Amino acid sequence: MKRRAFVRMAALSPLLLAGGCPLTLEQGLWAECRTGMDAVARGLVAESWRGLRAERVWDMHAHIFGNGRSGGGIHVEPEFDRPTTVKGRVKLAFYRNGGCVGEDEARFDEQMFVRLSALVAELPPGARVMLLAFDFTHDANGKRRADRSAFAVPNDYARRMAARDPQRFEWIASVHPYREDAVAELERVKAGGARAIKWLPPAMGIDLTSPRCVPYYQALKRLDLPLITHAGEEQAVAGVEDHEAGNPLRLRHPLDEGVRVVAAHCATLGEGADFDRDKNPDKAPRVPNFELFARLMDERRYEGLLFGDLSAVTQVNRAGTLPALLTRMPAWAPRLLNGTDYPLPGILPLFSPRRLVSEGLLDERALPAVRALRETNALLFDFVLKRNLRFGGERIPASVFETRDFFENQNRGQARARPRSGPGPAPISGGRVVANG
């Protein structure tokens, strides 16, 4: 269908995307996928890079996907590939527009990478993006279940894409722990240059508490492969019926095996059962997942093991936790990593810079530049927005964006005990960016 038809469908319900995720019409529904930056945006971008070593900046959470027509092995469920419902069509349209892939079905896979490459080329030399593979759902018997997998991106596909421009891309593998060859596959992807392992338990059907995960955790520790796993409620990808799959308290299982774990999104969405107070999920009190994550972060035994990533934390459905997150920045900064969750920053209705201004988190004079970046470069939009957040005098320091050390060096927590803040973005005055003296 043409985009005009999708606009009409989207107008039927502002809650169609992501199963009820609240949307905003602040900048409309559709990005124009333009290129280039105006002078206002260019100035704020330059100031936002102040104090950062671009060669240390790796965006550690970027998705690649497609429809599989290229023959590279990407899998998508029929309802995502050729949706039959209004909700499915609108959801696909948003993802396609967020990645600016156009309407040529035969070139969907390729255009996803071409557009991302163009965005990365506008970052300073040395900055890189880490491409995420995404394994199939597997059942309790270890059988691959394509029929229960919304999408899948093979490890070899992610590796090949990263190899097309090794000065700009790294890659992160995805291996389901129930696979019979799970440990062997971990060893293979490690040898192939994978920097970490990615899980989305609510979508993949992974129970972090399962005893069958123990040999897998031991292999991760032996191979020094960090585990990046979704924490909190999942709204973007359909999954299994285990509503506690993203409960942050389940992270104790890999942590207690000595695995370095990155809780994606810092568990900034939904509520989970407080198993510390009652092991029975039907009786345990419901607590915001972010509070459960914070509890783990405060346990000294997990220092140097538990980390959080900032992907998607500025979305309208997560931004309510930003004040608490920024307030904890002095203590947490050495254990936080930045990622964009690309292509989500390119989906206009998911973000409201105006709301961040109204809540005292963003200077209103930054709005023109931030909004302009949304239309031209989703990576820079996410980066500049986060670099300019403020609350109670706290901001996100440079160390959070310089993630390379985490993936290259063992024992990152001990090696970087103090965050390196740098001068950061200059203040905004009179509608323009002024340099620090």
Image (cartoon, rainbow, N blue to C red):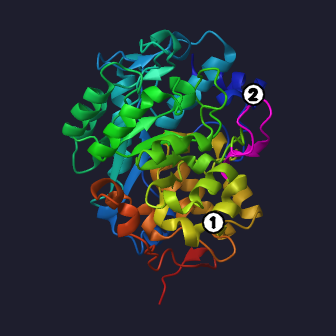
Whole-percent x, y for residue 98 in the image:
52, 36
Q: Which amino acid lies under the numbered mark 1 shown in the image of this protein?
A: Leu
Residue stretch rendered in magenta on the structure? 276-290
Whole-percent x, y for residue 293 in the image:
62, 51
Q: Is residue 335 left or right of residue 30?
A: left
User: What secondary structure is found at the residue carrying circle 1?
Assistant: helix
Q: Main secondary structure of the magenta part?
A: loop
Disc 2 target residue: 11
The span from disc 2 to disc 1 (Cα, nearest Å) is 35 Å
Q: Is residue 119 left or right of residue 166?
A: right
Placement of the N terminus among the 4 image quadrants: top right
Q: Is residue 216 left or right of residue 255?
A: left
Given residues 125 and 221, the one toward you in this image is 221
Q: Which mark is residue 326?
A: 1
Above or below 411: residue 225: above
Residue 61 located within the stretch drawn in magenta: no
Q: Residue at x 32, y 51 (%)?
A: 121
- How many marks on residues? 2
